[in-house]
Image (cartoon, coloured by chain):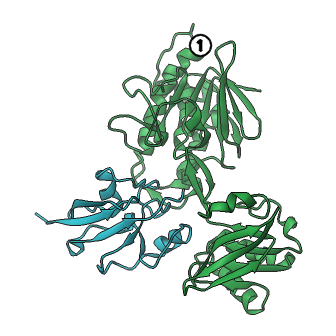
Amino acid sequence: MSADINIVIIDREGQSHQLVAPTDMNMNLMEVCKSYDLPVKGTCGGMAMCASCHCYVESDHQLKEPSDDEEDMLDQAFFVEDNSRLGCQVFMHPDLEGLTVTLAPESE
Amino acid sequence: MIQTDLLIIGAGPTGLFTVFEAGLLKMKCHLIDSLPQPGGQLTEIYPKKPIYDIPGFPTIDAGELVDNLMEQIKPFNAGFTLGESAVSIDKDDEGQFIVTTDKGTKHRAPSVAIAGGLGVFTPRKPPIANITDFEDKGIKYIIKDPEVYRGKKVVISGGGDSALDWTIFLAEIAEEVSLVHRRTSFRGHLDSVDKVMALAEAGKVNLITNAEVKEVAGGETLESVTIHAKDGSKTLVECTDWLPLFGLTPTLGPIGDWGLEIEKNSIVVDNATDYSTNIEGIYAIGDVNTYPGKLKLILCGFHEGTIMVQSAFKRAYPDKKLSFKYTTVMGGVGSLE
């Protein structure tokens, strides 16, 4: 059995949530947040087409570089910073143990 | 006034297929959609994306699915009010619903099916507190008449095709055009990107990258924007117009104020019977509704529409008997045209 990882989500009110995420189900960060009922809409269903799962990576994990699609969508988002990512493009992997992420402000 | 048997709000896949199922029962349908073309998010957001979970199609592009649905419902001659969004609903003396659009078009029907998907597509607005003070007074999210920018000082924001295309177009007629983008690379067509770069080189466009417009100011109308660069510097640019072009995003919109029971931005329906809402005669089908175990799939929208029209039929024709027939038994839908 593949290991679960522990991740931390800081919501828009600044409160931390400790989540346990499976790494063997091809789940992305947006889906993990939704499964914990955190306020992430995931409007487009994970196609990198809405930016409602925009977040900031706070820990120094080396994530895969964003794809062109993800960068393009971030172009249409607001409050974008250097550590901005779309949660739906960050897939759960054993290397991400301890990942800490802050949800970006909602702009829609 | 447009009279119909079933008024469908939303011309996405669910709304379109509902026309077919209603047509089998000889019910006339009329659809309203805020977008100028049918297909909803499939056409607007991902026409070239393949979909893999439509029964009978191992893979089909979203745009092609919409084309096929349009072909399938052709025999039933549904009416369309496109490019207008449903804003209000009333009931008349005869218990029929009157739905009015933002452009004043009125529709009348005994039943209304809300197949609104994610909602009305509206422009993404930059989060600047006083931005609303200058909407239509220099700030516009959608350009309808480019001639108004002749001789003006225009700032455009965005990195996609519409920002690039308008920059190229307005460079010819405006006095001054600045294009502001958060990165140095653009996602538009390569050809458009090259043109903008050439215009910038020739001094016809003021290209400002790694930067964002964060402040707007003016009196009666817009007078300037302040651009914050990644390096922390701020530049005030005098301008008459600012065009933030960040694409469209769906919101539930005015339907949220129709007295329907809403949960997490979706309309609560009774999935044990006919997908009716808390208001008798109003149904909600497809991605816009919610019930225990709801899945937002095109497939589920098709099912919900099919069940729903049986109930809507009884409202439209209370005295008629409803007999369900398979299309194979009917020998096609030609006899219903």
Residue B299 x %, y %? 42, 42
Q: Is residue B328 visible?
A: no
Task: Tell me which corner region of the image, top left, top right, bottom left or bottom right, holds residue B259.
Answer: top right
Left or right: B166 in relation to B306 = right
Identify the residue at horizontal 68%, vertical 68% (top origin).
Answer: B162
Callout 1 crowding tier (Cα within 10 Å): few <14, some 14–19, many ≥20: few
Identify the residue at horizontal 23%, vertical 61% (top origin).
Answer: A18
Q: Which chain is green?
A: B
Q: Is residue A75 above or below residue B260?
A: below
Left or right: B106 in relation to A7 = right
Residue type (three-letter) at the residue carrying disc 1: Tyr
Q: Quadrant of the C terminus of chain B?
A: top right
Residue A75 x %, y %? 55, 72
Task: Tell me which corner region of the image, top left, top right, bottom left or bottom right, holds residue B123.
Answer: bottom right
**Residue furthest right in the image:** B151
Q: Is residue B16 above or below residue B2?
A: below
Left or right: B97 in relation to A102 = right
Under tag 1, what secondary structure?
loop
**Residue furthest front in the image:** B219
Q: Which chain is cyan?
A: A
Using the image as rendered, state which of residue B94 and residue A41 is in the foreground. A41
Residue B22 x %, y %? 56, 27
Q: Is residue B296 above or below residue A57?
A: above
Residue B146 x %, y %? 82, 66
Q: Is residue B49 visible?
A: yes
Using the image as rendered, state which of residue B84 and residue B310 is in the foreground. B84
Q: Is residue B75 above or below residue B62?
A: above
Residue at image mark 1: B317
Q: Quadrant of the N terminus of chain B?
A: top right
**Chain assignment, label 1:** B
